[in-house]
Image (cartoon, grey):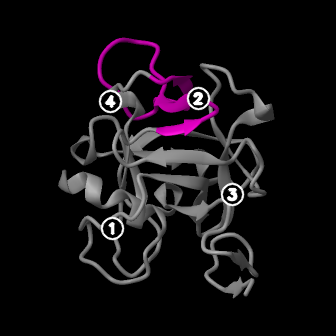
Amino acid sequence: MRSHLFIVAALLCATYPASAGEPLAPSEPVVRGAIRGDFAYGSQCLSVPAVEFLPGVTLEMRPCRNGVDQIFEWNVVSFEIKIHNLCVDALRAESGPSQPGDPIGLWHCQSTPRQQWYPLRSNPYLPTFSIIGTSGPASNLCLESLNASTVAGTQLALATCDGGDRQQFRIQPWPPLDDKVSSAPLGQSRVLSLD
């Protein structure tokens, strides 16, 4: 139950400090938005290539634009990340548990450990988090952008968690929350009220 209490606040990048790795209290059961890589060398969003919402399609990083191929729903109860009724999955051709190097793609939602993704903030003063997959935080397998690349189309895979730039993400809620519109590029905190 305690692990369920931190996902939404972590996903919405709460700005108040908490101890590293501490759960944060949620405010909603599902967070909808773009999953943005917060890499030191550029910002891109998790995307479905060529808008192909098909089981087995591998996901990639592309410039953020809040397109239909970039708006995901992250459920705080099931820990599934969904897009168009498919779940983000650690695709594995062989049987057995997930391993570093397994590609990240879409598959039919089956509530399996390969489709469960947990956010973990390693630094309480940064609004970013790692996305830990397959069986919870104890698995020590994180979502990672491959090859430290800023090239559109960079693939994602599971990797041993190291807290590096390639494993840092944040959620850009969509639509914008509370009648506010961002006046800055995705991920920056300056907002304008529509009042």
Mark 1 vs mark 4, CA separation in Å: 22 Å
For the point 66% across and 53% down, which residue is it? Answer: 45
Most foreground residue, 25 or 168: 25
Residue 161: in magenta span: no
Instruction: Give yes or no for contact between labels 2 and 1 (Cβ–Cβ under 8 Å).
Output: no
Mark 4 vs mark 3, CA separation in Å: 26 Å
**Mark 1 against mark 4, which lies toward the viewer?**
4
Determine which residue is flagged by label 3.
44
Mark 3 vs mark 1, CA separation in Å: 21 Å
In x, y percent, where is residue 107? 54, 22
Three-letter amino acid code of the residue under disc 3: Gln
**Quadrant assignment, res 123:** bottom left
Q: Which residues are magenta?
A: 81-109
Mark 4 or mark 1, which is nearer the start of the sequence? 4
Under circle 2, the secondary element is: loop
Three-letter amino acid code of the residue under disc 4: Pro
For the point 44% across and 77% down, which residue is it? Answer: 126
Against 108, residue 64 (above or below) is below
Q: Residues within 10 Å of mark 1 (few under 14, many from 20)?
A: some
Determine which residue is flagged by label 4.
113
Determine which residue is flagged by label 1.
122
Mark 1 or mark 2, which is nearer the start of the sequence? 2
Under circle 4, the secondary element is: helix
Q: Residues within 10 Å of mark 4 (few under 14, many from 20)?
A: some
Three-letter amino acid code of the residue under disc 2: Asn
In x, y percent, where is residue 31? 50, 54
Mark 3 or mark 4, which is nearer the start of the sequence? 3
Determine which residue is flagged by label 2.
85
Q: Is residue 142 left or right of residue 152?
A: left
Three-letter amino acid code of the residue under disc 1: Ser
Under circle 1, the secondary element is: loop
